[in-house]
Image: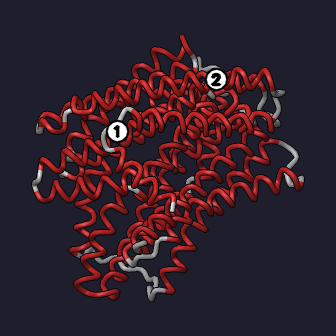
Amino acid sequence: MSKNLKNIGVVSALTMVSRVLGLGRDMLVTAIFGTSALASIFYTAFTLPNLFRRLLGEGALTAALVPTLQEELKAKARTGAFELVNQVSSWLLVVTGGIVAVAMFTLAWADELTARARGWGLAADTAWRLAESADFAIFLFPYLVFVCLAAAFSAALQTLQRFVEPALSPIWLNLAMIGLLGGAYWGGWADRNEGLMLWLCSGALLGGFLQMAVPAAALMREGWRPRLDFQRSAPLRQILALMGPTVFGSAIYLVNMAVARLVGLSLNDSAVAVLNLATRLMELPIGVFAVAISTVVFPLIAKYAAAGDGTRLAEAYQKGMRLILVINVPAAIGLTVLAVPIVRLLFERGAFGARDTAMMVPVLAVYAVGLPFFAFVNLILRAFYARKDTATPVRAAWLSFVVNLGLSLALMEWLGTVGLAIAGNIAVVAQAAYLQRRLAAGHKGLRFSHLWGDLGKIAVAGAAMGGLVAGGWWAWTRMVPSTAWGDATGLVVLIGLGAGSYAGMLWAMRIKGREEIAAMWEKFRT
């Protein structure tokens, strides 16, 4: 096994650990707070610094910093690379510190404005949720500084071929939040829910600090010495130029998320908490398998785009989309069919009861239908970036934002939380359709029509699998009592049976690229 494949395996394994811990964190939060207003308030408050983290830190900065650091490493060895790390981190400290200060001041003003709005016709419970969310966001916003610096240090480590510490980053956050909230709950450190929520927020801040400190320590062991450096060197300007389009495009997506959270918070106590939990479950298949698909397909797309080889680029793109459909269509069907036992097993304990399960199941089913489209968009955006087209993704993001906001406002009074989920799904479908149409306009080989035959086979196999799993669960519930162990055993048996039958049917129908799928699975399994 090559060194690169081993690195991929390590990162994939740690990503899985992080996802599981994130799910465990949400299980603990729901056991204590259920789908109460406090849970929705926390998820909304934590959304704001997370949005800026994704905007400034993990996405745009890493994408721009890694190639520039590689150039500095080749031209000036580690000395030049470490100088650039100091310049980037110094400016990040100033910029993120300024954003935190402005955000905290603005949120304090918004808190006061919300209090006044009660006299202008705003419902008292809505005003309270918005005001409390602003208060907790003020507490949480310093998290932004930690994670943006962590992104810079992690990018430098990746350039030096150290992948473990960056992959551990989200694990520290989950462990800190689980540790402080669990300790406060079982240790009796707080006597009311608001006090427990402060411990949860403190865990987020501690986790953010660890996300920054661990890669910084690893980088220092490689020879880096931190110091303030506010030079505006040519490499720094190059990073800013590379970040520009990505930041602008991502900003629309992140504003979309923030608006969806605020709309949900204004709807009722539970909407944001339910949407967040359903999103978490939907992201599990994306988070686990997107690593494998991106690792195999994206380098090929970038390589052929750079070489101007349209034929091979189209072949690589079709391969990626086929993998997206093969993995995510059955995952969507499985989540829909088994939504009740999955939600019941994972979350129904403590403050999260049968009523909350009944509320969450239709939302999860709606999100599951959109799962293939979310994964589809994730890959198709990479195709545009590989071709150095950043304008089209920005227009697609605007389209998604407008559709989501308009439908959310139209459907939320009629369908409640489910309406918000439907609006989000339709927005992603519109984004996917627009992007696919624009991509195919420049090359016939990139048309989706090449995949209709594969999609038909996947649909047939998926429908048969869904029927088998649904019938199996119906039979299981009549033979085995509805307990946690009974649900867990039934899910393991039926998921295994469903996956095996689905794979067997696809193999029997001789779906194109089956050997490649088997080879990729074997690589990541070993």
Which residue is at a point 60% across and 21% down the rendered structure image? 362
Which residue is at a point 37% across and 43% down the rendered structure image? 323
Residue at the spot of label 2:
268
Which residue is at a point 30% across and 33% down the rendered structure image? 398
Closer-to-camera residue (328/103): 328
**In the depicted structure, whether residue 23 falls above or below residue 454:** below
- Where is residue 487? Give x, y as percent: 75, 33
Give the residue type that dot 1 points to: Val
How far apart marks 1 and 2 lie (CA) works out to 30 Å
**In the depicted structure, whether residue 122 falls above or below residue 272:** above
- Where is residue 498? Give x, y as percent: 57, 33
Closer-to-camera residue (314/392): 314
Residue 377's label in the rendered image is 1
Of badges 1 and 2, nearer the viewer stands: 1
Residue 344's label in the rendered image is none
Residue 60 left/right relative to 205? left
Closer-to-camera residue (276/463): 463
Give the residue type that dot 2 points to: Asn
Q: In the figure, residue 496 lies in which quadrant?
A: top right
Local crowd at mark 1 within 10 Å, few (<14), some, or many (≥20)? many
Q: How many marks?
A: 2
Q: How is the image coloured?
A: secondary structure
Q: In the figure, residue 519 lies in which quadrant?
A: bottom left
Residue 188 left/right relative to 48? right
Closer-to-camera residue (242/505): 505
